[in-house]
Image (cartoon, rainbow, N blue to C red):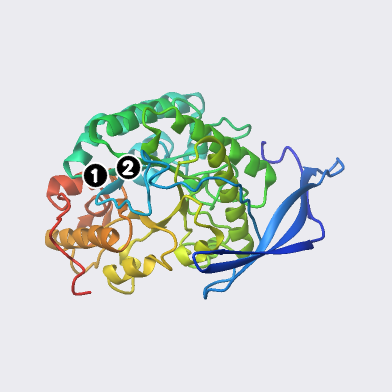
Amino acid sequence: MSPGKMTTIRALLGLMAFQTIAACDSGHCTTRTVTSVMTFEVPISEEPTPTVTTTTTTTSSDSGPTPPAVCITQPAVTCPSAESCPEWTDWKTYKAKNGVNLGGWLVMEQDFYPSWWHNLAPDAEDEWTMCKSLGDQCGPTLEDHYASYITKEDIDKANSAGVEILRIPLTYAAFLDIPGSELYHGNQLSYLREITEYAISTYNMRIILDMHSLPGGVNGLAAGEATDHTSWFFNNTNLNYSYEVVDAAIDWIAGASKPGAFTFTPVNEASDNFAGFGSGETLSTAGTTWVVQYTRGVLDRVRQKLPCLPIMAQDSFMGERHWSPYFGQCDNVVIDTHIYAQSNDSTICSRAERAAGDGKLPVFIGEWDLEMDPDDVSFEARKENFDIQRFAWFKYLHGGAFWSIKYHVPTVMVGDAPQTDYLNYEALLEEGVVTPFNETADYCKDD
């Protein structure tokens, strides 16, 4: 729906508690108070038609945060496990020694290639405004980019460093052409199929498909849809579009030669409180409830279509402990945390150990880089920083994916070192900073 075409009203009608349900699993007892909530979103000129959603308020006998009311479903299904899903990634046991993001490929971000971007659309902040600026040339321009930015040779290079898992950011426009959206809907999935099939068939790599954007915008950032777009939250129209995207993504994964190689992330770095972005206040209580409702809807769809597909829930910088009360043992969920080391106030190894949270859900570091102490940017320091981080994510968590495979930025970052020395995996590989995982070293033994 195009912005401004329809004025809508939303209402939340009276809450009515119906019953309390107690459930215990492996000694963990959870009490759910089931409530009925009626919501609607309609043109202001029309009469609202309410819908009924079941929500819950959850309390726990264990210590930890008490979550707000959330939408839950508990279908009678067999829990995904290594036995029931032998070809799929079992994140409870799987750990990735090496991973890398294919950022800047199917999600356009000017930070990756500022000179190229400036020559195309110097006033554009994001793909949305770039495509508006380019008009009919947006499609051909982006198709050329998709075809050349990531190739099979890049996958070969990643394999030479022992990369086992690729995290691939996507926009919703790869799957769905939404009315009013300026994001380009073209042949992204054809290029994605070619690269993922090559990585899987040639090197047995695993793939994380990451929805960096959803309709309406998930965080006000360029990659979330467009700068200042945040209307994904609390908008049933955009929620329904998002579920269409999810359905299309599940169908696309099911059509792969090896669906079991895939994990799916349904939203990335969601934030309805941008003033707190990157902290434990990235989401409000209502924002958390919205994300959980959406994620549970995704889980329902996965159970119906592809029940062994793992869901990677990006934590919005809130940590595993924030999310673990919302998911049970039958929820095939792994948490994605993003850590940029320069902002740490403690050692990398301690940060990794703490990121495991209460240990209920496996944790993967979906983004990390070499933001370092400006007083020491030598080759030796960068290699040590890389090796420690990669090892820590593996020892205490379930691995990680470096951000990103390419990053062509000449801007000075710290000292005389260009940003490429911190964010470009291929450049770090050529320089010798990135080497295959050392099976015998313990970089955290003195931590």
Give the side of residue 202 with respect to residue 237, left or right: left
Q: Measured along the vertical axis of the image, is residue 268 above or below residue 237?
A: below
Where disc 2 sits, the SS reads strand
Q: Which mark is residue 163?
A: 1
In front: 240, or 2?
Answer: 240
Q: Residue at x 47, y 50 (%)?
A: 332
Give the side of residue 22 with respect to residue 106, left or right: right
Examine the image and state in which quarter residue 242 appears. top right
- Residue 428 at x, y percent in the picture: 19, 49
Q: How many marks?
A: 2
- Residue 75 at x, y percent in the picture: 61, 47
Q: Is residue 32 visible?
A: yes
Name the residue type under label 1. Answer: Val
How crowded pointer 2 is (Cα within 10 Å; few <14, some 14-19, many 20+) is rated as many
Q: Is residue 183 visible?
A: no
- Residue 143 at x, y percent in the picture: 40, 26
How crowded pointer 1 is (Cα within 10 Å; few <14, some 14-19, many 20+) is rated as many
Where's the C terminus, which quadrant?
A: bottom left
Give the side of residue 39 with respect to residue 366, left or right: right
Q: Separation of disc 2 and disc 1 at Cα?
A: 8 Å
Q: Look at the numbered discs 2 and 1 and tell me whether their residues touch, using CB distance below 8 Å.
A: yes
In front: 372, or 75?
Answer: 75
Q: Measured along the vertical axis of the image, is residue 175 above or below residue 114?
A: above
Where disc 1 sits, the SS reads loop
Name the residue type under label 2. Answer: Leu
Q: Which mark is residue 166?
A: 2
- Residue 60 at x, y percent in the picture: 58, 71
Where's the N terminus, which quadrant?
A: top right
Q: Measured along the vertical axis of the image, is residue 209 above or below residue 327?
A: above
Give the side of residue 367 with respect to residue 239, left or right: left
